[in-house]
Image: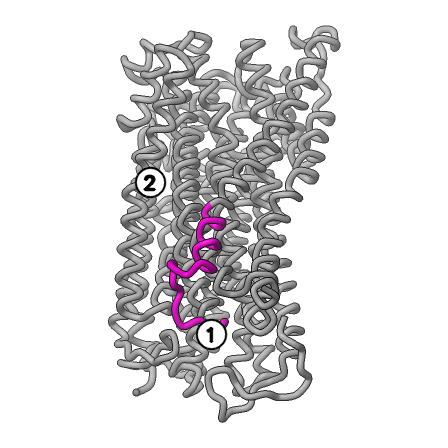
Amino acid sequence: MGSALLPDLGTEIVIPVCAVVGIVFSLFQWYIVSRVKVSSERGATSPSNNNKNGYGDYLIEEEEGINDQNVVAKCADIQNAISEVEGFSTKNQPCTYNKEKMCKPALATAIFSTVSFLLGAITSVISGFLGMKIATYANARTTLEARKGVGKAFIVAFRSGAVMGFLLAANGLLVLYIAINLFKLYYGDDWEGLFEAITGYGLGGSSMALFGRVGGGIYTKAADVGADLVGKVERNIPEDDPRNPAVIADNVGDNVGDIAGMGSDLFGSYAESSCAALVVASISSFGIEHDFTSMCYPLLISSMGILVCLITTLFATDFFEIKAVKEIEPALKNQLIISTALMTIGIAIVTWTCLPSSFTIFNFGAQKVVKNWELFLCVAVGLWAGLIIGFVTEYYTSNAYSPVQDVADSCRTGAATNVIFGLALGYKSVIIPIFAIAIAIFVSFSFAAMYGIAVAALGMLSTIATGLAIDAYGPISDNAGGIAEMAGMSHRIRERTDALDAAGNTTAAIGKGFAIGSAALVSLALFGAFVSRAAISTVDVLTPRVFIGLIVGAMLPYWFSAMTMKSVGSAALKMVEEVRRQFNTIPGLMEGHAKPDYATCVKISTDASIKEMIPPGALVMLTPLIVGIFFGVETLSGVLAGALVSGVQIAISASNTGGAWDNAKKYIEAGASEHARTLGPKGSEPHKAAVIGDTIGDPLKDTSGPSLNILIKLMAVESLVFAPFFATHGGILFKIF
């Protein structure tokens, strides 16, 4: 079939080098952010004499009292508060896809799968932890830089987000590559067993992501809903007012849910799509001929992604200046466009240098001949589908466009019409992303079967460093605004941080869109790998065993959403009661003479997140095991298909509805247009209706919607890991009856 232009030695050098470059770049960004001092020493702010990013521009004049050490000390104090199976044979056995060849024993694969599971889980946890550390590290620094101008504040927030993005992308790639090479020492030429064992890496990553997303979502929304209902609706005090006992818990929650949760979610998608591609490739010509460079094509795509995102980041931080508020959102959107355009070129380079001109891909029992340019199109269609999903998400969630403005206008007649318009917007926003995903699936499957779908998912995730950078930017900016409010900084500073936050809301919605779209492709790729591994030739929906699985699987996202939303409601109820108690019993709290008990509210959110995430987690983890053991692989295939089809729709709708309600409220509060001013100001009846809609949308956009990604991915990868056991011993009930 030919060989790749890039030799194996080159592959062994390129992948770890790119990963190390990503880590070094993220540490360099961290260093730059660290130069913004949060101590009460003289000259706390980083010196600069140039006119870049906000200096000397009449739109962004320097704030008076820039060296006011009381403000710096307050910011530092607030940041400190926020920071607070198959039968396990021990003998070699015939390989599944080549009976003439002997593969390593099942017990060894089980042990190595456990090791890779632990590696994936640890990497996911570390990525989320580091993300939260840099977010809390950067909050106050962003606030302090906002005194010099919105451009300076933007750069600190974005650099901080880039630290998380590059650390996660590079760590995920490096650990996976090291694991493959270590496992090779034992498996040798048994690539089928090697990459089957590697699937545990994706399972470990998604398992931690489940608890990060669900637990983090419950944590942050319990605090957010409680703070809003009592503070803004009942007491009519501003958001993030230091008198509100729940504001610290709310700020902590932003980091837990939006930083750690999103990071572990996208890490899980990256790990699973890589594992799905490697499993399929291991039984194709790449694995049969032991072509290491071609086998590592998914990892080389990710390596190129790190380099492309590095260049893209410089466009936001070095090549162009942010001089006005209106330039913030375009700068973030340009990150997506530039990274997608550059990555398309990068994919072409990797494809033509690392793949032979033609090769075969395993396709449900047969080998399908594929050209390298066809695989390029598979990756590219996933990449561009992600960009389309991002821009459609932005259209439906940004208050710069008519959908959100219509939702805001509906607040004239009260909360009920606001809710009706918001739900309609969410349902409508599903249409174009689903078509984009459908086209990506059709094109990639037509060219390269399930391997094509797996690399299309990798294409969508290839710019993960940039995607996470603009996603993490949102919570950092949000907390910077909260710190400005709590530290008593001027209204002008708050306007700047609000502008950063408004753009961050939209980019957070775009990030959720990417996560959901990639989850759909990843789940389908895992589904294909599961069907192949379980030796199912066809999945016939007219078969009763499959159809009952299909309809039950379609129900699971509703059950899961009900659990998570009720958990947020229960935790928020406790939070509301505690905030009311403090306002009613602490003398001078409302007047600002007494300090609220922040710790109790933080404890309520912490306890609720730990307790309430167990039932949804059990539902996701136990369903594949119960169905596979008692009903067999055919029914399980139906469950996976039903959950995928239903879950993607609900996830997109919930995330976009919540994002639209949030930005409709901000549209009224900002009063930037004549139309918005007719609906305001804060405290008006339309504004109160918008706050209610925003409160309803909080658990939708930050808990239930994003968590559904994990449900469909985790069930699929768990089924893949246990597929040999289910195929051999599953379907107990059908065997009995």
Residue beneath disc 2: 430
Residue at 46% x, 65% y is: 274
Which amino acid type is shown beneath numbered disc 1? Ala
- Evaluate whether residue 306 shows in this view: no
Residue 551 sits inside the magenta stretch: yes
Tell me residue 693's x, y (percent): 45, 21
The disc at residue 535 is: 1
In this rendering, the answer to whether 224 lies above or below 513 is above
Distance, label 2 to label 1, CA atoms, is 34 Å
In this rendering, the answer to whether 280 lies above or below 312 is below
Image: magenta residue range: 534-554
- In the displayed image of the protein, which residue is found farthest to the front? 737
- Evaluate whether residue 75 shows in this view: yes
**Labels 2 and 1: the sequence-earlier one:** 2
Q: Secondary structure at mark 1?
A: loop
Which amino acid type is shown beneath numbered disc 2? Val
Q: Quadrant of the C terminus?
A: bottom right
Query: How many marks overall?
Result: 2
Q: Quadrant of the N terminus?
A: bottom left
